[in-house]
Amino acid sequence: MSTRIAVVTGASSGIGAATARRLDAEGFHVVAVARREDRLHDLVGSLTSATAVVADVTSDASVAALADAVSSLDGSLELLVNNAGGAVGAEPVERADVAGWQWMFDVNVLGTVRVTKALLPLLERSGRGTVVVMSSTAGLIVYEGGGGYTAAKHAQTAVAETLRLELSGRPIRVVEIDPGMVRTDEFSLKRFGGDAEKAAAVYAGVAEPLVAEDIADCIAWTATRPHHVNIDRLVVRPLAQAAQHKVHRVL
């Protein structure tokens, strides 16, 4: 059998790194993609079968080079996990940092479009392709202080839904994963400009927020269903988070 290849963007930390590890355990040859070369090589060195590709999903040339690197591998590209993304800032719309909004749109939305567009021919060639779009519960509902991030994630959700319609009849599934509260080393820290106190406050009193491995488990499950089974959308929250605005905290 041909080697099954999975591409994971944003693989240098958090959900991306956990997903790379999980897919490696599932028997995929993992193409780990991120900008931070040192972290990528550390990750790939710990895996059974993997390739590191340094790439920036906001760059056309970089993504084209990624596609060339994947096409040169011995195997069949069956899975793309569009995980690269993130949030910056939590200011209200009236004080919006437009540059921050632009960054979120470029990475979350256009990054997903750019990588998916580049790799669709290889996914289709496999005869059993799957595109996973890592969106968020923020792509389903808005909240105060989250205007830029929710706008980007709503757009990313729209991309996933549109792509599924457009690929109907072709052998490519489109899966949207929408996590709620996930505690990782970098997400909230980056959102609050490195302010560790503000980052920690997001999870204060929450006994068990989700962790990166929980989301990696969801991705692996959707990707390893029989190919005629398409998990259109998987919403996953910790038990403590009943809704975007309702989180049980013990303080």
Image (tube, helix red, strand yellow):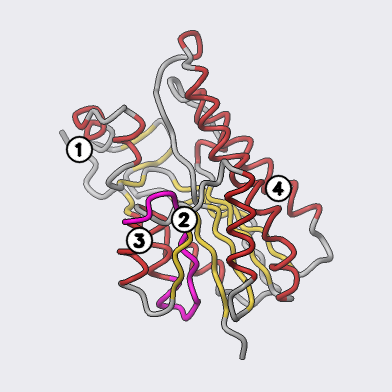
Q: Quadrant of residue 248?
A: top left
Rounded to the nearest whole Å, what is the CA distance between mark 3 and mark 2? 23 Å
| Badge nearest the viewer, 3 or 1 | 3
Query: Amino acid under label 2?
Result: Val
User: Callout 1: helix, strand or loop?
Assistant: loop
Q: Which mark is residue 54?
A: 2
Q: Is residue 37 magenta?
A: yes
Task: Point out the residue furthest to the right here.
Answer: 169
Q: Earlier in the sequence, mark 1 or mark 4?
A: 4
Residue at 42% x, 56% y is 11
Q: Which residue is mark 3?
A: 213
Residue 30 location (% of width, % of height): 48, 70
User: Callout 4: helix, strand or loop?
Assistant: helix
Residue at 54% x, 55% y is 234
Residues in magenta? 23-38
Query: Amino acid under label 1?
Result: Gly
Q: Which residue is mark 4?
A: 161
| Image quarter (top left, top right, bottom left or bottom right) of the C terminus | top left
Q: Which mark is residue 205?
A: 1
User: Callout 2: helix, strand or loop?
Assistant: strand
Up-down: is 24 above or below 237?
below
Within 10 Å of disc 1 (Cα), the crowding (few <14, some 14-19, many 20+) is some
Up-down: is 109 above or below 89?
below
